[in-house]
Image: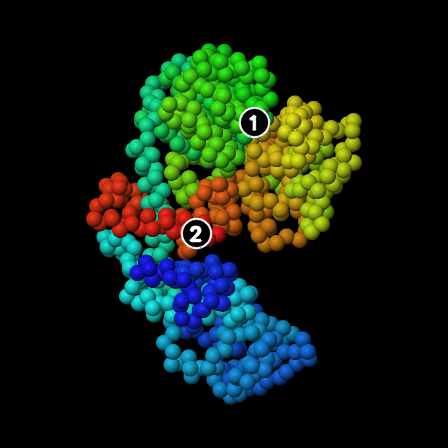
Amino acid sequence: MSDYLQQEIKFLSGVGPKRAELLHKELGIYTFEDLLYYFPYKYIDRSKFYKINELNQNLPYIQLKGKIVGFESIGAGRKKRLVAFLSDGTGTIELLWFKGLSFIQKSLLLNTEYIVFGKPGYFSGKYNIIHPEVESALKAQNVISAKLQAHYNTTEKLKNSFLHSKAVSKLINNLLVVLKGKIKETLPDYLLKKYKLISLEEALFNIHFPQNTELQKKAVARLKFEELFYIQLNILQKRSYRIHKSKGYVFSKVGDSLNLFYEKNLSFELTDAQKRVLKEIRKDIGSGKQMNRLLQGDVGSGKTLVALMSMLIALDNGFQACIMAPTEILANQHLDTIKEFLDGLPVQVGLLTGSTKTAARKELHENLLNGNLQILIGTHALIEDTVQFKNLGIVVIDEQHRFGVSQRAKLWEKNSQPPHILVMTATPIPRTLAMTIYGDLDVSVIDELPPGRKPVQTIHLYDSKRLRMFGFLKQQIEQGRQIYIVYPLIKESEKMDYKDLEDGYESITRAFPPPKYAVSVVHGKMKPKEKDAAMNLFVKGQTHIMIATTVIEVGVNIPNASLMVIESAERFGLSQLHQLRGRVGRGADQSYCVLMTSFKLSNESRKRIDIMTKTTDGFEIAEADLKLRGPGDIEGTQQSGLAFDLKIANLGQDGQLIQYVRDIAESILDDDPDLSSPDNMMLARQLKRNANKKVDFSVIS
Ligand code: ADP
Ligand code: MG
């Protein structure tokens, strides 16, 4: 049957080469299988008929039954339209057409009963339906139609070629006729029984032509289960290979480095979340398997400290450690933080970045090779082949999404056996998404901030209130605080009225003139050296205001900066807004974030702004982001290499189901890691089939 499903769509009755071309281009449908898995986006209950006198202005698509009692042609030329008056005894409604007028008028008869389907509108005191679907009531009676009518997304181009939802439904009907009895089951019998799932054939039939609401629900449940289950099975099998087949250094003991640090230098209690995560890491690095762990935690949650303590354990076991940051500024910050943490302890720490001078570099290389240098902090420069360690045991990668997978892999080669890897990210990723994109990494979460932090207060202001905002800025500067002002663009764009950085710089320097005020500027078009210089002025407190584009998004830690102004905030996505806001609120003072927007806001933008003013919880924001935008746009998904080509499940909404099927997949693999038992052979085959399919897709696109 797989042959059947792989047949080109042009061979389906009702399609042909022209329609096939359109289906490729507009919907990505190439094969029978693609069409079979082109699922409806909604169902309309066609058993319910409204009365015309029940209509109100908020109704979705509805069905009416009535007779056409008259026609009228209005206007001339391009403005010509046809009105049919439909009456059902309770009232009259206008049916309106702008296209195909003569054809429609000829096909409709007066005083004959019709079923009319469409979305009612209201215009100058009357209800109307524009371009309704109309069918004869008599004919409808003779067709065995599903009670729930499936509706499919189509495009303008498809509609122009008469491939509207109903036509797609007809094609699928043709397909199901051809496939009858040929749809092979893809889940083993024991899973269907145990989890009360209907067969694939029944599910595919009822997803397109539901016999009743219950079966429609069962069809969705079965298909979602299958889709998510195979994703999890695939990820978990890969992970299980890493865990069972890879080898890792064993850090079995805790020694002086960690103990001294803990007793002498750590001036505060670890949070419960930090303790829990450390336990998880210690379990990994003591297991003899390579650790591959993602450490998620909101900005300021204390990830660096956890990383440092993990590195100290490596040192206690005779290994070296390194930490890689995405920019020089961040590498420098890590150096400062870590040196301060380790003050007075016999641990040698070094820094390697693009600006490290040749002589210093040479010395560093030597000390790495002879083992005198124990912790190396740096940027991409760490990856270079000339950087050789005596015995590298653990690699910490900060702000993960700036590094590619292949860059990470290069670090693995720096010892005879791959070192343990700890990836840290402050971009909160909803659990369900993490389980899916980073499913082969183990995930630890610090979901608690150190005590005593004051949440950032977030204020939304319309652009018209700019003077008030300036007044607030002046107050803050008088109190000795520093301020970020972030713009979405560098240069004015013609199309969009977003505040741009150059313009902003002018108005800010006018409102905050030198010598009383000093302003730094940082944007992505500057050379790294210039950027660092400007940044450093601000870091050292020599400028009051930092005007920037989103280049400052990641990691920078300037506790004295207590105010973040985001211009054209409607332009930013939620995770970006959250990252930007995370730049403030790092000191003891109350911090503020001001979101400036124009007065006109789209619904989506308003929702984003509302969420930002309502909560500072990164995970809550990430969940909301996932729901608003869908997983395709969430940071990390593009880099993950995992195509998010879900047909029916939704990572934003099906979190519980993902956990459910993951547990099932896990228990299957526990008993049968290679999926070689007769019961599970179907699973192995299906995994292989899915993997092959993905390759095919990439060849086509
Ligand atoms: P992250 O890297 O997760 O953004 P950091 O590790 O930079 O966070 O920590 C932010 C600040 O909080 C640092 O100044 C750090 O010393 C401090 N910190 C970390 N853990 C704790 C804790 N348990 N109690 C108090 N302060 C902490
Ligand atoms: Mg950090």
- Badge 1: residue crowd in 10 Å (few <14, some 14–19, many ≥20): many
Q: Cβ of disc 2 within 8 Å of ligand 2?
A: no
Give the quarter of the image for residue 6.
Answer: bottom left
Q: In the displayed structure, would residue 153 be above or below residue 623?
A: below
Q: In the displayed structure, would residue 162 be above or below residue 634?
A: below
Relative image position of residue 571 (x, y in whole percent):
62, 46
Residue at point 49%, 72% (across, down): 62
Depth order, front residue of 36/579: 36
Task: Determine which residue is flagged by label 2.
Answer: 697
Q: Cβ of disc 1 within 8 Å of ligand 2?
A: yes
Of the residues shown, which amino acid type is indicated by label 2? Phe
Q: In the displayed structure, would residue 568 be above or below residue 216?
A: above
SS category of the residue bearing label 1: helix
- Badge 2: residue crowd in 10 Å (few <14, some 14–19, many ≥20): few
Residue at point 50%, 30% (across, down): 398
Relative image position of residue 414 (x, y in whole percent):
43, 24
- Image marks 2 and 1: residues in contact by CB distance under 8 Å: no
Relative image position of residue 83 (x, y in whole percent):
60, 80
How many marks on residues?
Answer: 2
SS category of the residue bearing label 2: helix
Depth order, front residue of 410/75: 410
Task: Determine which residue is flagged by label 1.
Answer: 330
**From this viewpoint, is residue 449 visible?**
no
Relative image position of residue 392 (x, y in whole percent):
42, 21
Residue farthest toward the bottom in the current orientation of the protein: 111
Observer-side mark, 2 or 1, equals 2
Residue at point 52%, 15% (across, down): 364
**From this viewpoint, is residue 121 visible?**
yes
Give the quarter of the image for residue 418.
Answer: top left
